[in-house]
Amino acid sequence: MLDETETEIARVLDEVVAADKATGGLSNRGWTRRIKEGLCALGQRKRLGVSAAGCVGADTGEWLFDLVWVDGQDKPWQFWEIPLAMECEWSTNRDDITWDFEKLLVAKARLKLFIFQQANKNDVKKLVESLRLMVRAFKMSFPGERYLLAGYSYDDHVFSYDSIVV
């Protein structure tokens, strides 16, 4: 079950799917740009600092991850907390996907968003199970840590969402 923030993120991603359908198809770069801009706006509505390369509206360029939300109260770059760390990997190659996902395993973020794609819903489901096993096997997780896995099936033109709570 998705929590409130995860549901808001899913809404942003679903809007990108709608934009893709309306424009006749976005490039991977176009998908990434729209996702970052949508998540940047969401983070700012939550009064958080946002780091993301090539993203209109971000407070700074990329910092460690494709996109990061930072909460430092009145000093946004004091790093009191990282509410969100995001990685996005459009390659369908398992090694490329695993490489990016491993970054999130070591992130000290409350929510870790991983966006990926596979051909169909069944392939997305198989990959989610592999990523779930990686989370369970990782010994340095902390209680309450959450992962939102957003797997896009390009044959079906839809995201599937899975939440993992440690």
Image (cartoon, rainbow, N blue to C red):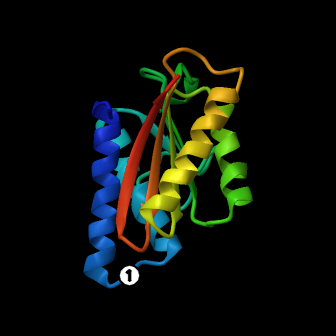
Residue furthest bottom as drawn:
24
Element on which disc 1 rests: loop
Left or right relative to 101: residue 35 = left
The x, y position of residue 77, in whole percent, is: 55, 30
The x, y position of residue 16, in whole percent, is: 33, 64
Residue that badge 1 annotates: 25
At a point 69% along the width and 31% down the height, the residue shown is 106
The reply to whether residue 126 is visible in this rendering is: yes
Residue furthest top as drawn:
143
At a point 48% along the width and 18% down the height, the residue shown is 144
**Quadrant where the N terminus is found in the figure:** top left
In this view, 55 is above or below 27? above
Other-residue count near label 1 (Cα within 10 Å), few / some / many at <14 / 14–19 / ≥20? few
The x, y position of residue 94, in whole percent, is: 69, 58
At a point 55% along the width and 43% down the height, the residue shown is 129
Q: Amino acid at mark 1?
A: Gly
In this view, 140 is above or below 15? above
Tell me the quarter of the picture where residue 18 sits: bottom left
The reply to whether residue 64 is visible in this rendering is: no
The x, y position of residue 91, in whole percent, is: 62, 67
Q: Of 26 and 54, which appears nearest the observer?
A: 26
At a point 37% along the width and 58% down the height, the residue shown is 159
Q: How many marks?
A: 1
Tell me the quarter of the picture where residue 20 sits: bottom left
Q: Of 124 and 55, which appears nearest the observer?
A: 124
